Image (spheres, grey):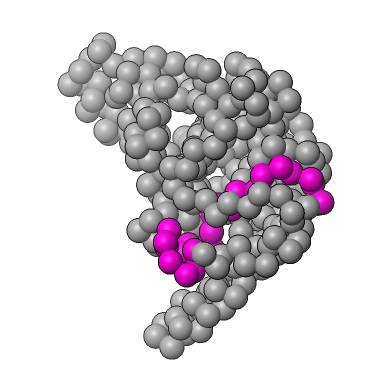
């Protein structure tokens, strides 16, 4: 049993033309599960060959904008594209209110489209069924979608509380998604023996140089940026978690700062990590496709 993962967005809140906001889609037989939909990630679904109407499940790690702001576009694309069933949404406390407000913001659009197209559009396809998940130190089953078991666990993105990571598995094939977190024992435990860990990563050296350059031109933004390392894991800490969890493959996503795809910053992003973690390390790119498990 195997399933595929496509990285829809490998960036973070800082703008970068190569990297969209956070997002990934898991593809298993006829099921498609999207995890997070930051800015631009919904559009990446088309480039990844996964049109929104084929997606019936959305998992949200936490309610930061770089993980959520493509959701209203996705809802409309999915529904107008022919979805017949409600979207099932799993997320932390606060998800229900956010989804209700996204739909409220699109209320006029939905009204106009029904007024124009009538019964050609499904009444069900624009609905959402939200499951707010408790934040637990140990992983717990959120739901089962086809062959995939979806589990959630709490990560440490304080003061963003609650924040979740997800573990998706099917017949022994396991992929773990960190969400946004500092170095976190819950994540290390949930990722034990995983075939794939998709983990956020902050390169402290590149971030520091970028911050100093920014300070020269925009000291206020630079001061805000000083807070960013408080709630993210450095590349070396990510390597430590991957080592301690014994994962087979580590893919860095949600890169801070979001370096270009090519050039010395991308080449140096994972510097020093292989001294800590002996497994495969990949610096993720938007639309990278990964297979989890064998055949
Ligand atoms: Zn983020
Ligand atoms: Zn965040």
> Residue 267: x, y in percent?
52, 64
Q: Is 45 in front, or is 89?
A: 45
> Residue 98: x, y in percent?
50, 41
Say if the magenta span includes residue 263: yes
Q: Is 143 in front, or is 97?
A: 143
| Residue at figure coordinates x 32%, y 18% from the top left | 82
Q: Is 236 in front, or is 90?
A: 236
Q: Is residue 9 visible?
A: yes
Q: Is residue 74 visible?
A: no
Q: Is residue 196 left or right of residue 41?
A: right
Q: Is residue 133 left or right of residue 96?
A: right
> Residue 40: x, y in percent?
37, 47
Say if the magenta span includes residue 75: no
Judge whether 165 appears above or below 11 on screen.
Answer: above
Furthest residue toward left: 116
Tell me the quadrant of the picture where the N terminus can be found: top right
| Residue at figure coordinates x 55%, y 68% from the top left | 268
Tell me the quadrant of the picture where the C terminus can be found: top right
Q: Which residues are magenta?
A: 244-266
> Residue 201: x, y in percent?
61, 59
Judge whether 144 appears above or below 208 on screen.
Answer: above
Furthest residue toward bottom: 216
Furthest residue toward top: 119
């Amino acid at each position: 049993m195997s399933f595929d993962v496509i990285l829809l967005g490998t960036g973070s809140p800082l703008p970068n033309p190569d990297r969209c906001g956070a997002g990934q889609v898991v593809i298993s037989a006829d099921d498609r599960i999207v995890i997070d939909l930051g800015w631009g990630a919904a559009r990446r679904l088309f480039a990844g060959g996964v049109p929104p109407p084929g997606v019936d499940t959305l998992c949200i790690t936490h309610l930061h904008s770089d993980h959520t702001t493509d959701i209203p576009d996705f809802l409309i694309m999915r529904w107008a594209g022919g979805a017949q069933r409600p979207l099932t949404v799993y997320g932390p406390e606060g998800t229900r209110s956010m989804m209700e407000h996204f739909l409220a913001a699109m209320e006029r659009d939905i009204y106009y489209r029904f007024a124009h197209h009538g019964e050609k559009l499904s009444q069900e396809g624009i609905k959402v069924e939200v499951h707010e998940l408790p934040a637990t130190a140990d992983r717990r089953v959120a739901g089962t979608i086809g062959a995939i078991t979806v589990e959630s666990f709490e990560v440490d993105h304080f003061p963003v509380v609650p924040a979740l990571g997800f573990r998706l598995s099917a017949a022994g094939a396991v992929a773990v998604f960190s969400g946004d977190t500092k170095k976190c024992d819950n994540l290390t435990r949930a990722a034990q023996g995983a075939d794939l860990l998709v983990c956020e990563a902050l390169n402290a050296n590149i971030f520091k140089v970028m911050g100093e350059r920014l300070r020269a031109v925009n000291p206020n933004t630079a001061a805000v940026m000083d807070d960013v390392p408080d709630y993210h894991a450095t590349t070396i800490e990510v390597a430590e978690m991957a080592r301690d969890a014994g994962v087979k493959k580590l893919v860095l996503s949600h890169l801070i700062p979001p370096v270009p795809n090519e050039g010395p910053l991308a080449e140096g992003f994972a510097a020093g990590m292989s001294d800590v973690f002996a497994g495969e390390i990949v610096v993720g790119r938007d639309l990278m496709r990964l297979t989890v498990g064998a055949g």
